Image (cartoon, grey):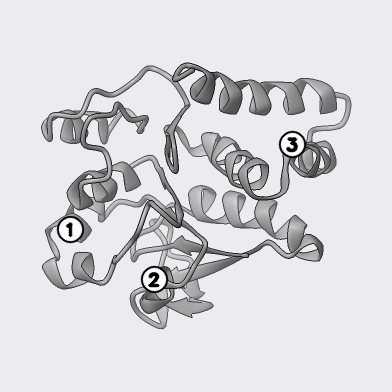
């Protein structure tokens, strides 16, 4: 199973790298995250240049697509050519967005009829599209999920791992990366965020 972590120019390093790093701890179990970019090299909001591992076309074949955030999200949404390359299918793919990535999902129509999570700066732009924004770090309905706040990317990764490999795999990853002495607290907080979001629909 492959995960496309869509990473645009001006991206937020925390959003793309935390999610991909956590997911890639499951490569031995067949789950792999790949930084997917519209150009061969993209530059982060802090000037870090990254070479993409896959071109944007990869989103059509990936099992999971996570839309990262960044300072140029509104430019991305306004770029018809770029948006046209994001041919996603929620009937067969898990699709998630981090912070301002919610604007992209909204532009693509995946947030119609559901609330979303995003960061404080992006919130008014998401709401301007008629989408309610929750004061929560994570929300999921079916195969669509959004996360708000840079460190909520761990919840997005937890959701992906849980949905594809099961909760035990997610627990193992979280246990390894947790701050020393805060293992159980970190694991339970992440799983609670994921389960409460999905449980709200039951």
Check the image and name the residue furthest to the bottom: 40
Neighbor class of circle 3 (other Cα within 10 Å; few <14, some 14-19, many 20+) is: some
Q: Please, is residue 46 above or below residue 106 in the view?
A: below
Instruction: Calculate the distance from the C-alpha at mark 1 to the C-alpha at mark 3.
Output: 37 Å
Q: Nearer the viewer, mark 1 or mark 2?
A: 2
In which quadrant will I find the N terminus? bottom right
Q: Residue at x 51, y 55 (%)?
A: 16
Residue 10 against residue 97 in the figure, above or below: below
In the image, is 134 to the left or to the right of 19?
left
Picture layout, residue 175 above or below residue 50: above
Q: Which of 128 and 89 lies nearest the eye of the viewer?
A: 89
Relative image position of residue 167 (x, y in whole percent): 74, 36
Cα distance between the residues tagged 1 and 2: 22 Å
* Mark 2 to mark 3 CA distance (whole Å): 26 Å
- Please tell me the numbered disc located at residue 60: 2
Disc 3 target residue: 167
Q: Earlier in the sequence, mark 1 or mark 2?
A: 2
Instruction: Say above or below: 42 vs 130.
Output: below
| Residue at point 35%, 52% (across, down) | 70
Q: Label 1's element?
A: helix
Q: Position of residue 132 (x, y in %)?
A: 23, 23
| Residue at the spot of label 1 | 75
Residue 154 location, quadrant: top right
**Residue situated in front as seen by the camera: 41 or 147:** 147
In the rendered structure, which disc, 1 or 3, sits on the residue that comes first in sequence?
Answer: 1
């Amino acid at each position: 199973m492959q995960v496309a972590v869509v990473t645009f120019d001006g991206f937020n390093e925390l959003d793309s790298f935390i999610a991909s790093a956590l997911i890639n701890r499951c490569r031995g179990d067949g789950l792999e995250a790949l930084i997917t970019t519209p150009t061969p090299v993209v530059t982060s909001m802090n000037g870090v240049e990254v070479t993409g591992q896959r071109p944007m076309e990869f989103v059509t074949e990936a099992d999971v697509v996570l839309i990262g955030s960044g300072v140029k999200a509104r430019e991305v949404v306004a770029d018809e050519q770029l948006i046209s390359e994001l041919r996603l299918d929620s009937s067969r793919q898990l699709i998630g967005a981090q912070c301002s990535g919610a604007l992209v999902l909204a532009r693509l129509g995946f947030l119609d009829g559901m609330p979303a999570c995003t960061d404080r700066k992006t919130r008014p732009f998401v709401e301007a599209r008629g989408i309610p924004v929750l004061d929560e770090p994570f929300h999921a309905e079916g195969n669509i999920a959004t996360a708000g706040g840079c460190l909520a990317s761990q919840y997005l990764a937890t959701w992906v791992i849980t949905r594809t490999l099961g909760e035990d795999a997610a627990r193992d990853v979280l246990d390894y990366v947790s701050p020393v002495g805060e293992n159980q607290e970190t694991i339970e907080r992440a799983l609670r965020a994921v389960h409460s979001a999905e449980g709200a629909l039951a």
